[in-house]
Image (spheres, rainbow, N blue to C red):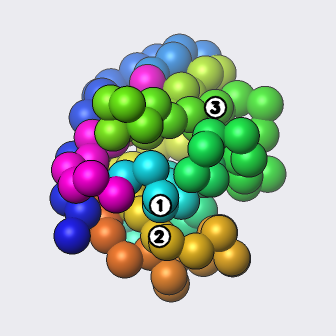
Amino acid sequence: QVQLVESGGGLVQVGGSLRLACAASGRTFSSYVMGWFRQAPGKERDFVAAVNWSGVITYYADSVKGRFTISRDNAKNTVYLQMKSLKPEDTAVYYCAARPSPVEVTRTTGYNYWGQGTQVTVSS
């Protein structure tokens, strides 16, 4: 069992930065692929980024490439999402999630554990 708790969301102006953190419980954190997804009101939950167990391999949605960076610290059981050059369209609830398999990491299916989400609002 893995429990995930996100933090770091908030209100930021266009062009600003935020760093989200997701703290995980459980001794098997380092064996999971960790992902970030986001969901805007009335829209589906979309993939943002993912990182493999070691932190070496990362995946990004085209919409955030070059602006967002995902990383993890297995010693702290934490995964991060550094967000820069934020745009109004980045406004959403951001969720972290964990899955055992590195296959199809951009899909919500396969992620066994989800956090409760943290709101990110980018004002223009």
Disc 1 element = loop
For the stretch drawn in magenta, what is the main secondary structure? strand
Type of the residue with mark 3: Thr
Disc 2 element = strand
* Residue 24, percent from left and from top: 27, 48
Please identify the residue farthest to the bottom as the structure is shown: 109
The count of marks equals 3
Task: Give the labeled residue for mark 1.
Answer: 32
Q: CA distance from mark 1 to mark 3?
A: 18 Å
Quarter holding the N terminus? bottom left
Task: Give the labeled residue for mark 3.
Answer: 69
Task: Give the labeled residue for mark 2.
Answer: 99
Magenta highlight range: 19-28
* Residue 17, percent from left and from top: 51, 17
Q: In the figure, 108 relative to 48: above or below? A: below
Crowd band around label 2 with a 10 angstrom C-alpha radius: few (<14), some (14–19), many (20+):
many
